[in-house]
Structures are given as C-alpha cells and as structure tokens.
Image: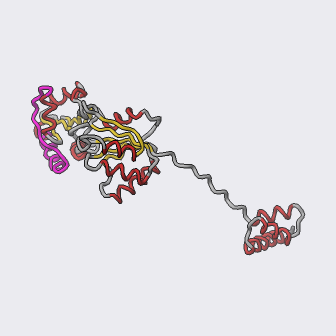
Amino acid sequence: MTLYIVGTPIGNLSDVSQRALDTLRSVSIIAAEDTRVTSKLLARYNIHTKLTSCHGHNERGKARWLVSRMMETGGDVALVSDAGMPAVSDPGGAVAAAAREAGIRVECVPGPSAVTTVLALTGWDFTEFAFYGFLPREKGDLRSKLSEMSKGARVAVVFESPRRVESLLAVITEVCQDARVFIANDLTKTHEWTYEGTAADTLAALSARENAQKGEYCLAIQFPAAAVEPEAAEPIRAETWILDALQRGVAMPEAVEFARSRGVSRNEAYRASVAIRQYLSKNNY
C-alpha cells in the first residue's frame, strides 16, 4: 500500500502528466483539497475514482482516517491539492507524516510548479532563491518579514491572494522601493498575465488591470544587492605606538606624546607607559 502525493496542473489541465493520470485511476481513493476542483480534472480524463475531502480544516482528522483505511484495506491513496504540489503552501503534510509514522510507503508523483514557472519567466540571472509561500496578513508583521527577507535573500518567491496582492505591493514599496518585482496571475491559463517592474510600477499596472481580483498570484522579488560595508580597522594599541617610538631612540616622555598625537587618550598612554616600564625593568632592559 502506498500514499501517492500527486502534483496537479497549476492552470492548464493539459499539463498533467501521464503518470499522474495513471496513478489517479489506479488508487482506491483520492483525497482532494476541494473535491469540486479535482472533479473537473477527473472528468476531463474520464477518471471515476472515489473522492474524499482533505483540506486545511479537517486535515489531521482525515489523515488518521486515511491511514486507518489503508491499514484495513491495503488500498493505495492519492493525495492532491487544487493546483501544484500538496503540502507546499497547501494541505497534505499531516497526511504524509501520519502515513510515514504508520509505516506506509509515501511516493511523490511530481507535477507543475508555480514557483519554478515564475522564476523561469523572469529571465533573471541568479543561482539561488528562497520560497516563502504566503506572507503574514498584518501590516506590521508583513513589514518585518519583508525587511528580514531583503537581508537574507537576493531573489524571493511568494504566493498571494487577489484580495491582498495590492497591499503586499504597497508594503514592498515602503520597505524596499528599489526591489524589482515579477508578478504572474493565472499561470498557464488562457488569460495568463505577467508584469515586471518596481513594486510601485507593478502596483500601478495591477490597479489598472481589469479582473485583477480574480485568480491566484505568484510573485518573484529581486532585492538589490546589499552594500558591503568595509570592516572597521582595529585601532592600534597605545603600547604599539610607544614601542615604535622607543625603538627609534625616543625617550619615554616623548614616546608617550607621540602615542597621544596618534589619537591615544592621556590615561591610555600613561597606562601603556607604566606597563612597558615594568616589563623592561623586569627583563633587565
């Protein structure tokens, strides 16, 4: 018995793999984030496997039920979300964890990804990126998170709902006005829309767009490279200046004044001169 984590199309139903279709046909039950959404995919490919819901509000209870059912019947189960890969900013993680804990084989059937799709579309030159999923809703938390991201990632990818995407762009403008944004809506669908610019430009383009409040958004954010601050030079100790003067044949009082001319405080110069005198006396210099 196996729990299959199946990636499904992020928009265009033709993007589903043959292996995913074969898996969905072969299992005894499909656990879907929204059975209405998955039903459209199954109908398109004439698949009649039984469906059960497994979403964010019932996932833990459904995980126990699915594991118990698999242990009793020995049947395989497929886990799908509405789009993309289950457990990646979608329900599914609890089911996979419960299956592993019960000793059930867990196998992944990979599929399309909005993350890699939007990154490929940017054309940006990068070798690494960070994925943050959905960001905090509260403005204060969002500002803090974006500030943290700007210091820790050169390129970041996030998801956002159509209801909050304008607010996200507004806060990006506040936190890092020099950031570059690539935004995508309805990826792989007929009315796919993308735009690249500063956060302010992107917000203006989005506000002028019809039907902006429909479909999910995926954004790639390119933060400007942080300026590398030169390391502060370690201050030269008073002893160093005084010893340098003494080695050139200067008497101690003049050596102390030489150290002071190099920015050493009176107290520090005096302390250093006493320590040097004691060392020289102890070692018979």
Eyeballing the image, is 256 above or below 224?
below
Residue at the outermost front position = 208
The number of callouts visible is 0
Question: Which region of the structure is painted magenta?
Answer: 44-70
Residue 266 placement (x, y as % from top left): 75, 74
The colour scheme is: secondary structure
Residue 194 sits in quarter = top left
Q: Quadrant of the N terminus?
A: top left
Q: Is residue 110 above or below residue 252?
A: above
Q: Does residue 233 appear left or right of residue 218 in this picture?
A: right
**14, above or below 145, in the image:** above
Could you tell me which residue is drawn at 40 percent across and 52 percent down?
146
Query: Outermost residue, top direction?
Result: 18
Q: Nearer the viewer, residue 163 or 30?
A: 163
Is residue 39 in view from this perspective?
A: yes
Q: Nearer the viewer, residue 123 or 242?
A: 123
Image quadrant occupied by the C terminus: bottom right
